[in-house]
Image: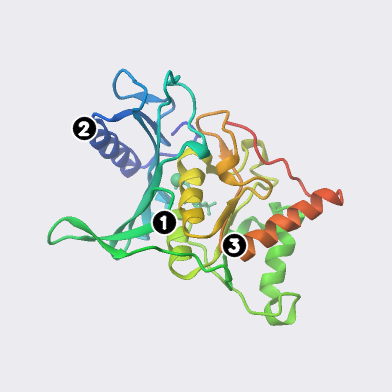
Amino acid sequence: MNPQGEVQRPLDLMADEVFARSCAGNSSVGILISEEVEEVVAVKAAEAGDFVVSYDPLDGSSNLDVDLSVGTIFAISRLAEGGDAERLPQGQDLLCAGYAIYGPSTMLVLTTGGRVDGFCLDPETDTFVLTHPDMRIARETGEFAINASRRRHWDGVVQDYVAQCIDGPIGPRGKAFNMRWTASMVAEVHRILIRGGVFLYPIDDENRTRGGKLRLLYEAYPMALIVEAAGGRATNGKTDILRIVPDSLHQRTSVVLGSGAEVDRIAAAYEQAERSGDSVHLRQETCG
Ligand code: AHM
Ligand code: MG
């Protein structure tokens, strides 16, 4: 079991070991935060300026047995001057974020905040080649991604949003929507970068006490930095993901990210529900 009480597969642990070993070989890396490790790992005696690397070594690992795409997600910040090695990195501190996706091709998608670039692994030369410069997320989309089997747990905002998408041309949206769900956040975000879309993993009645499903530091933060640098938006429904202040290492959060027009629509619906005092549960930041 990992710190979140989830079953760890052998490849989760191997990926963690490979990632940690390769970071430890870099003298600028001081601290590692991994989905698979309960505590912060100090690679060396931490000094101001050292890099803090938060990562999910193998995201979407429920896909391993069925040979679907999985990936590695990471975010990098620096330990501040006089910094406390135990202080958790915040969204605003991130210098870089990226993911690798192990699909039909292996890609590395990277941002240092200004823009997002995609690199394909050339197995002949063992190098990553810039194949997708300046990836941008279309503001408008007709595609959404959510685990619809959780519908009975959703709050009113998510129920209404998805119902309207499914109603398509005969509903209030007046257009058809397509739906995808891969159970691999890396694959969902990659698809959204390539052809637009919106991804939701909301807090719902079943995961509320845990604070949601996805982890803030090494899943939501890095994906939010990437999505925003590509012109999209990432929120927990109420607060932009990068503005959430963490209070525990493996904290979870609600996530809505992707094409700006759809994320704006969902955020506006939450705001409206809160204003009108609807029975929508808006408690977003909680729980380790
Ligand atoms: P993991 O890090 O244990 O693989 O969990 C995160 C994954 C995400 O990639 C994906 O969006 C989500 O869990 C899928 O959850 P579900 O199985 O509820 O559809
Ligand atoms: Mg994960």
- Assess mark 2: CB under 8 A from ligand 2? no
Residue underneath mark 3: 260
Determine whether, in the image, residue 208 is placed left or right of residue 182. right
Foreground tag (1 vs 3): 1
The picture quadrant where one finds residue 163 is bottom right
Looking at the image, is 122 positioned above or below residue 175? above
Looking at the image, is 24 positioned above or below residue 236? above
Q: Name the amino acid, label 3.
A: Gly
- Residue found farthest to the left: 124
Residue underneath mark 2: 25
Foreground tag (3 vs 2): 3
Foreground tag (1 vs 2): 1
Residue 4 in picture, x, y percent from top left: 50, 34
Does label 1 or label 3 sit earlier along the sequence?
Answer: 1
Q: Quadrant of the N terminus?
A: top left
Does label 1 or label 2 sit earlier along the sequence?
Answer: 2
Q: Name the amino acid, label 2.
A: Gly
Residue nearest the observer in this picture, 203 or 148: 203
Residue at mark 1 to residue at mark 2: CA–CA distance: 28 Å
Residue at mark 1 to residue at mark 3: CA–CA distance: 16 Å
- Assess mark 1: CB under 8 A from ligand 1? no
Determine whether, in the image, residue 105 is placed left or right of residue 198. left
Q: How many marks?
A: 3
Determine whether, in the image, residue 191 is placed left or right of residue 232. left
* CA neighbours of label 1 inside 10 A, class few (<14), some (14 to 19), many (20+): some
Q: Name the amino acid, label 1.
A: Arg
Can see residue 278?
no
Residue underneath mark 1: 115
Residue pictured at 87% horizontal, 52% vertical: 276
